[in-house]
Image (cartoon, rainbow, N blue to C red):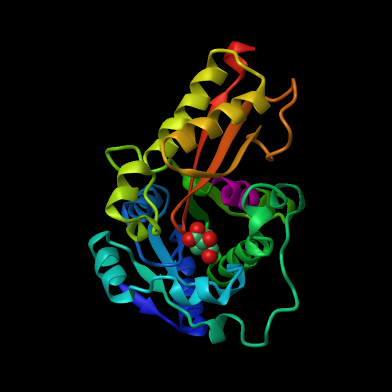
């Protein structure tokens, strides 16, 4: 496994790999790797000859300086995990290397930015889209893998790739869950023991919403009210619940073929997210 911090050296290596006609998959991460990331890497191996993982805590996608400085940085441990997953190249740039002259150009994707995560974290998605576009430009992968856990991020990246004619296949990987249903996340380790017990209720309520939609309920506003009651009863503090068209996160219409339930809750100071897609076609 080769580790590159410098963009130039990485580009030279990639040029060589491209001359050898190797297919390249990229898994962009911010490090602090858990089983969810490893699932992305395993999927990446199925689509390419060479798997590159980037580890970069991207400052421009954080709302607050505190969040950025508190983000766990576990490079040594991450590199050990990556070598066990037969990763070929790891890209670990500094912020100075990525943003040497500040940043006047940004990528921003209108519609899906404005709801859910975009409400409380106003700059987040343009920060994500900008760094992902930069990583795509530096690495020029054939394929890039993203987790369905960050569903809104996935929608935004797919839209960016389509609208900006980027020749990259975006592969999505299902959420990896603990046995109790809690979606794996770098934030889970911030939960107290008591919160860990209560956290899976987020998954249960998401699943409950999916089940009532499958049974034919379409009164989304009432469903959201009921879900809020369920979350509070379980000791979780509801943050946001959206039921939207899964395609571009627009309002659900009679033409929608699948909806996504996007949920976030607070447990103490920790904000957890989850989601589930429900197909409507078969029951309409
Ligand atoms: O999902 C993440 O870890 C980040 O948002 C990403 C895609 C690596 C961009 O910084």
- Kindly indicate the quadrant of the structure image that contains residue 189: bottom left
Horizontal arrangement in the rendering, residue 37 relative to residue 139 (left or right): left
Position in image of residue 268 (x %, y %): 43, 55
Horizontal arrangement in the rendering, residue 197 relative to residue 120 (left or right): left
- What main secondary structure does the magenta stretch of the protein show? helix
- Count up the numbered dots: 0
State whether residue 156 appears in this view: yes
Classify the position of the C terminus by image quarter: top right
Residue 102, compared with residue 234, is above or below; it is below
Position in image of residue 29 (x %, y %): 45, 63
- Kindly indicate the quadrant of the structure image that contains residue 77: bottom left
Residue 4, compared with residue 277, is above or below; it is below
Position in image of residue 31 (x %, y %): 39, 67
The answer to if 183 sits in the magenta stretch is no
Residue that appears at 68% across and 49% down: 159
Q: Which residues are magenta?
A: 151-158
State whether residue 177 appears in this view: no
Residue that appears at 69% across and 40% down: 248
Position in image of residue 264 (x %, y %): 53, 45
Residue that appears at 37% across and 49% down: 184
Classify the position of the N terminus by image quarter: bottom left
Horizontal arrangement in the rendering, residue 54 relative to residue 224 (left or right): left
Residue that appears at 31% across and 56% down: 192
The answer to if 154 sits in the magenta stretch is yes
């Amino acid at each position: 496994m080769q580790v590159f911090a410098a963009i130039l050296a990485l580009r030279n290596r990639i040029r060589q790999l491209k001359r050898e006609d190797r297919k390249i998959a990229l898994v962009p991460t911010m490090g602090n790797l858990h089983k969810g990331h490893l699932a992305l890497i395993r999927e990446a191996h199925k689509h390419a000859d060479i798997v590159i993982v980037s580890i970069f805590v991207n400052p421009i996608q954080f709302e607050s300086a505190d969040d950025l400085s508190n983000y766990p940085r576990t490079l040594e441990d991450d590199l050990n995990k990556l070598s066990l997953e037969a990763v070929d190249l790891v890209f670990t740039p500094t912020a100075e290397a990525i943003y040497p002259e500040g940043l006047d150009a940004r990528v921003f994707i209108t519609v899906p930015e404005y709801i859910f995560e975009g409400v409380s974290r106003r700059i987040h998605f343009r920060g994500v889209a900008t760094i992902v576009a930069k990583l795509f430009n530096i690495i020029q992968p054939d394929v890039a893998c993203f987790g369905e856990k960050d569903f809104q991020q996935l929608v935004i990246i797919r839209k960016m790739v389509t609208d900006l004619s980027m020749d990259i296949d975006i592969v999505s990987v299902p959420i990896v869950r603990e046995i109790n249903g809690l979606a794996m996340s770098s934030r889970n380790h911030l939960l107290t023991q008591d919160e860990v017990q209560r956290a899976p209720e987020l998954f249960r309520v998401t699943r409950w919403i999916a089940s009532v939609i499958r049974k034919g309920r379409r009164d989304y506003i009432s469903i959201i009210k009921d879900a809020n009651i369920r979350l509070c009863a379980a000791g979780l503090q509801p943050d946001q619940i959206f039921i939207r068209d899964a395609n571009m996160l627009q309002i659900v219409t009679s033409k929608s073929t699948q909806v996504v339930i996007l949920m976030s809750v607070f447990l103490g100071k920790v904000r957890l997210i989850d989601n589930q897609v429900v197909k409507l076609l078969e029951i309409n």
